[in-house]
Image (cartoon, helix red, strand yellow):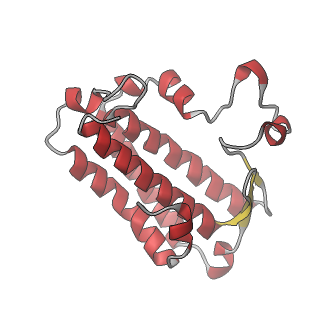
Amino acid sequence: MPTREDYLRQPLERRLARLAGTADELTEATRNRSAAQLARRPETASWSATEIICHLRDVEELFRIRFHTILALDDPQILTFGAEPAALAAWGIGGPIGHPLDPDRWAEERQYARNDPSQALSAFRRHRAETVALLESLTAAQWQRGGIHLRLGRLTLGDWVASLAAHDDNHLAQLERALEGRG
């Protein structure tokens, strides 16, 4: 499975093609599966296929907001989940409240397990199409705009796309494992 670094070595067109193909891959992987099959967790601590689709749907909105922020502002800091506590303190994040981008928190609070998988996939498909349309409309100069990742430093829009592509691959593999009953 390609990593973020692997995608960084690939042409931008290939990264965009990866993003454009994810919804179809999710559709194919879940075709002819019942809602019960998609809702089954392979292990208590592992997400079901439905929960993975919901996560992808919600992360898609997050990344599109990041992309719009990078286009609108000069080198904005971008909130990320894996940032160090010291970096998060400037955002007022820490202590008992927890991180607002915690994927497990999202899954619980947004009740991923109770979502309709076909509706979640439809929403993901729509959001991803909007993201790809935005990215395909960018000029060469816009692709060089960047945002400050709290752990990795300045990343251009192309770098952020590499991260999203690798994120897709990671969760597509996780979805396959879930459907096979492996955590």
Q: Residue furthest front?
A: 182
Task: Describe residue 47's horizontal placement relative to residue 167 as left or right.
Answer: left
Location of residue 90 in the rendering, given as x and y in whole percent from the top left corner: 86, 39
Q: Residue 117 at what x, y percent from top left?
A: 30, 35
How many numbered marks are there? 0
Closer to the camera, 48 or 137? 48
Quadrant holding the N terminus: bottom left
Q: Is residue 45 above or below residue 147?
A: above
Q: Is residue 21 above or below residue 120?
A: below
Q: Residue at x 57, y 52 (%)?
A: 63
For residue 74, above or below residue 42: below
Q: Residue at x 54, y 34 (%)?
A: 103
Q: Is residue 114 left or right of residue 61?
A: left
Position of the C terminus, as image quadrant, is: top left
Residue 127 appears in the rendering? no
Left/right of residue 102 with respect to residue 27 in the rendered view: right
Quadrant for residue 23, please give it: bottom left
In-front residue for pair 144/179: 179
- Point out residue 119 in the picture as x, y percentages from the top left corner: 32, 37
Q: Residue at x 52, y 57 (%)?
A: 164
Rendered residue at 72%/43% (across/down): 83
Q: Which residue is outermost to the left?
A: 32
Residue 164 versus residue 152: which sits nearer the camera?
152
Q: Position of residue 75 (x, y in %)?
A: 79, 62
Q: Is residue 104 above or below residue 59?
A: above
Q: Quadrant of residue 155?
A: bottom right
Report if residue 139 is visible in the image.
yes
